[in-house]
Amino acid sequence: MDQREEHNRSASNGIKVICAGLGRTGTLSLTEALKKLGYKPYHYVDFNHLPAWEDLADGKCSPNDVIDLIVRDGYDAVLENPTCDIYRDVFERFPDAKVILTVRDRPEKFEKSWKTLFETMVLTEETFRWSFPSFFGWIPAFCQLKKIRHFMGTTHLQLDPGALTHGWRQKEDGWIAQQYLKHNQDIIDHVPSEKLLVFNVKDGWKPLCNFLECDIPNDQDFPHSKINDTRSLKRMRKMLQIAVYSWIPTAGMAAAGAFFLGRHMIRSRR
């Protein structure tokens, strides 16, 4: 039985790896790496779990209720916000898990990347107005994701709801970098050193595989995801803006086309 089969067979046993680093620290690259090592990683959120995360954000359930769903669905590694916001709860449930703290080269790089992400995501939270006719607020999943973003940073960082993802716009430069350092230090303070790997994805397979006690995939380069890098996020922002401003004329043209097609069909029947 190879490593992948062994990990998948025992996935239901619980969480084996807790990536407690904040988003924008290479968590998507680490997700792909863990998949190659045979884990079933939980990156960001399973959209089937959105109601539970929304309830947690509203104080209607506990972190353990969300953790139960994650384990029930066979995930054995968790990464990214909002799960890293409850990393203490996950580690308390699974004290034998190994904890990975993903980091950037410098706090300033993290801050720039974090701001780029949420300058993009904020477009999906705008309410409809004729100057910005956004339809995202009418989609339940986007409303749930907005609540989840407001939950981020409210646990061990003890920030006000929304401060980490929205309130930074009223803060001085460097405030996000400070929260990044506080978050990282909280993990270092609460996780035994023998259970913790501070990891920059630029370091590749060796430190990760040594920590997880598995063989290095010699036939595969360490994955470095470009799906949500700065260039991709800026492209996504432009696409969201196009979607917002184009759906009304597109819908109007479709309605007009349907109207004239209907008239033509009625006339052709006479």
Image (tube, rainbow, N blue to C red):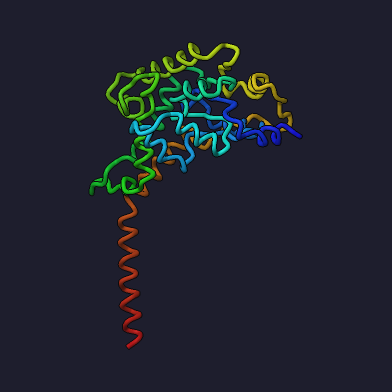
Decide: is 57 above or below 257. above
Decide: is 194 above or below 228. above
Q: Nearer the viewer, residue 89 or 238?
A: 89
Q: Nearer the viewer, residue 202 or 87?
A: 87
Q: Position of residue 8 (x, y in %)?
A: 66, 36
**Can the viewer see residue 7?**
yes
Residue at image position (32%, 63%) is: 253
Q: Of all residues shown, which one is farthest toward the right?
A: 1
Number of numbered tags placed on the structure image: 0
Q: Position of residue 223 (x, y in %)?
A: 61, 32
Q: Position of residue 81 (x, y in %)?
A: 45, 29
Q: Of all residues shown, which one is farthest toward the left?
A: 130
* 66 left or right, relative to 246: right
Q: Nearer the viewer, residue 40 or 219?
A: 40
> Which quadrant would the N terminus be assigned to in this image?
top right
Q: Position of residue 186 (x, y in %)?
A: 45, 14
> Which quadrant would the C terminus be assigned to in this image?
bottom left
* 217 left or right, relative to 116: right
Asked which quadrant contains residue 235, the reply is top left
**Can the viewer see residue 119?**
no
Decide: is 71 above or below 134. above
Asked which quadrant contains residue 35, the reply is top right
Residue at image position (36%, 17%) is: 174
Residue at image position (46%, 13%) is: 185
